[in-house]
Image (cartoon, rainbow, N blue to C red):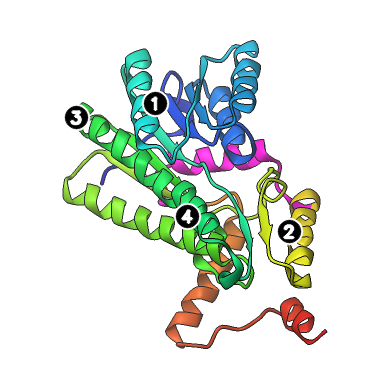
Amino acid sequence: MGEKMTDLGNLQGQVIVITGAGAGIGEGIARAAAASGMKLVLADKAAERVDAVAASLREAGADATAFHTDVTDPAQVEELASQAYAQYGQVDMLINNAGIELIGLIWELPPEQWRRIMDINVLGVVNGLRAFVPRMLEAGKPAAIANLSSVGGVSQAPLQAAYLVSKHAVLSLTECLALELRILKAPIHVSAVLPGPVESRIFADSAAAGEHKLIKAHHEEMKAMIRDHGLPAQQAGERILAGIAAGDFWVSPHPEMMAGAAAARGSFLQGLKDPQLNERMAQAALD
């Protein structure tokens, strides 16, 4: 793995590819990248959303192109990479951001919902790596790859098992990617991005499976948390882009939250402790 890629002052003219760019963190990173003078390849399955983001950025003077890409389809992601290189001749930064949420008890979530979240959150990242890493290696130039995990990627909680499993997987995948590129001495920097709450549609668009009263209550609480306490998406995007450009492996728009979650996880594993409900969930279980 390589050197630190660059700093924010040197991003002018570099090409960034962002999946899940039609809203939330992906859109926030896109706007931050445009403000830094980058050329943008924006991908999302939600065609109207990503078209609107790209149009808005072009109106502000950015070089932005939208692609309608389902990250669960390897052929579509391969086509995204092919088009990006055909149009710009290079890709300097890849952001594997596309992801969804899912709330419910493990045994009540239908198999198709388990498959969907893994296909998008985990295999969507794998598809991005399979399409872009070979091209980056062939180019032999400094580049950066960032995969979106979550503060939940170092945490555990009830009712969000499917999401947390996927984000733990993305974190492990990203660590392994960094090591494999280091073996090859590739000039490709890797970042794991662990956001906390950010203004987005992730809970508004998420499914909640099951009839238990805790499921619906938790879903509403998560939507309220994002609404009332979520970091503005563009601010999150600016912090994430800055961390990637600075060459950090661990990147978060919520650094204190990430550090706290990592410390708690480290203590939990070092002590081989039993999983514990937080105070709110423990009280809800008694009601």
Kindly identify which numbered label has been placed on residue 222: 2
Q: Give the CA distance from mark 3 to mark 1.
A: 17 Å
Disc nearer the start of the sequence (2/3): 3
| Image quadrant assignment for residue 255 | bottom right
Query: Residue 13 in the image: x percent, y percent?
Result: 43, 18
Near mark 1 (Cα within 10 A), the count class, few <14, some 14-19 or many ≥20, is many
**Closer to the eye: label 2 or 3:** 2
Span of residues in magenta: 229-249
Q: Mark 1: which secondary structure?
A: helix
Q: Are marks 1 and 4 in contact (CB under 8 Å)?
A: no
Amino acid carrying label 4: it is: Arg
Of callouts 1 and 2, the N-terminal one: 1
- Residue 244 pos. (x, y %): 45, 41
Q: Residue at x 74, y 51 (%)?
A: 226
Q: Which residue is mark 4?
A: 115
Q: Which residue is mark 1?
A: 80
Q: Residues within 10 Å of mark 3 (few under 14, many from 20)?
A: few
Q: Secondary structure at mark 2?
A: helix
Q: CA distance from mark 1 to mark 2?
A: 33 Å
Chain-order first, disc 3 or disc 1: 1
Of circles 4 and 3, the one toward us is 4
- Say what secondary structure mark 3 lies in: helix
- Disc 4 or 3, which lies upstream in sequence? 4
